[in-house]
Image: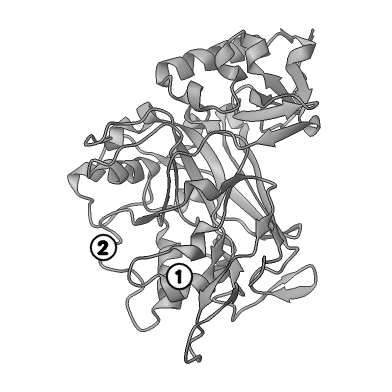
Amino acid sequence: MNVIEIPDGSPFGRDNLPYGVFSAAGGQPRVGVRLGDTVVDLALLLGDPVFAAPSLNPFLAQGPARWAQVRERIRAAAGGPVPDEARHPVRDVRLHLPFEVADYVDFYASEHHASNLGRLFRPDAAPLLPNWKHLPVGYHGRAGTVVVSGTGIVRPCGQFKAPDEAAPRFGPSRRLDIEAELGFVVGVGSPLGGRIGVDGFAEHVFGAVLVNDWSARDLQAWEYVPLGPHLGKSFATSISPWVVPLAALRAARVPLPGQDPEPLPYLRGGEDWGLDVDLVVTWNGQEVARPRYRDMYWSPAQMLAHLTVNGASARTGDLFASGTVSGPEKHRRGAFIELTWGGREPVTVRGEERTFLLDGDEVTISATAPGPDGTRIGFGEVTGTIQPAVGG
């Protein structure tokens, strides 16, 4: 038994302790936490069989009192010697999808992103539609195509029609894009016909992950009127393998940037759930954007309140994401359609002018947030590489 050494400045110290699902040396997937560069097997460390499961869902369903109790047990145990059989170098393990995704909803919570896409998609109209500042706009995604970081992304096929074409055509997307987002994982659900209020957020949501909501902009532009995104979004959504618990993000909480007009009463609450999270987007290893989550207009607490206000149930393993994180400056834009202004303003990547994704391209999104006493909390990375379309 030895004490786990945490490198100086590591974003995975004892104030973070993100949860994931791993397998080592051909073993079965099970739950662990990351401490420095080590994955700790929680079933062995704590002697608790709930962590021998191949998913976080059984633990998530146990609720906030249990989450807090386990976090304190991990912090105490990780401060002393840890059995050798419970320790695995992170480089030696395989990381899996950390929870079974029950439902997936993607929001559109950045005023900057919504305004930019409004200008691109509707150049002769107001950037924001009349409802945007009154409710968190979202769409229901496809839970079965949420994949863990490192999973290859097959270029989707579908219908698209350029403005100068008389009829649509079918084939591989030519305007494949990313969306850098933050996602939130529901632990405790709610009954059909019930509601989760804004101030009930922390009683139901366990933690946060990084999200890349891959987007086929040509498919999306042709299909989204009148019912919104479908095939342009449903082919793949990547998430990071580590779920950062809300308890690790206390020092990252900030006020929202301001909401005018004042939201309706069900979207108001006494707690601010703005989050000071800094994202970094790299394209084939080159940094191209640094979105800031603190610029988001709608909070995750408001998103969850709106998601359930009509009586829709929430379930353990539900994932809801923020939508693209973007800011007022060009280098804060979290989607390539914004960064290149619809492909009209290419960016230089590894010496080449680029607009949308080509086969073989790799995109990585990483993020950190403030922790206690000047430390940083790490979310890890979500990475995907574009693979050629199948058929078409």
Secondary structure state at the residue bearing disc 2: loop
Give the number of the disc on residue 116. Answer: 1
Identified at 51% across, 72% down, the residue is 219
In the picture as drawn, the residue positioned furthest to the left comes out as: 265
In the picture as drawn, the residue positioned furthest to the front comes out as: 391
Q: Are marks 2 and 1 in contact (CB under 8 Å)?
A: no
Give the number of the disc on residue 382. Answer: none
Q: Which residue is mark 2?
A: 131
* Of residues 80 and 44, the one drawn nearer to the viewer in this rendering: 44
In the image, residue 203 lies at what x, y percent? 36, 26
In the image, residue 187 lies at what x, y percent? 43, 29
Indicate which disc, 2 or 1, sits on the residue closer to the N terminus.
1
In the image, residue 113 lies at what x, y percent? 45, 63
Secondary structure state at the residue bearing disc 1: helix
Left of 303 or right of it: where is 152?
right
Identified at 69% across, 61% down, the residue is 386
| Amino acid residing under circle 2 | Asn
Q: Could you tell me which quadrant the C terminus lies in?
A: bottom right
* Of residues 160 and 348, the one drawn nearer to the viewer in this rendering: 160
Mark 2 vs mark 1: in front: 2
Left of 337 or right of it: where is 222?
left
Structural crowding at the residue carrying mark 1, measured as other residues with C-alpha within 10 Å and reported as few (<14), some (14–19) or many (≥20): many
Q: Could you tell me which quadrant the N terminus lies in?
A: top right
Quarter of the image for residue 41 reads top right
* Of residues 195 and 182, the one drawn nearer to the viewer in this rendering: 195
Question: What is the CA distance from the residue labelled 2 to the residue labelled 1?
Answer: 16 Å
| Amino acid residing under circle 1 | Asn
Question: Do we see residue 328 in this rendering?
Answer: no
Identified at 47% across, 51% down, the residue is 142
* Of residues 240 and 110, the one drawn nearer to the viewer in this rendering: 240
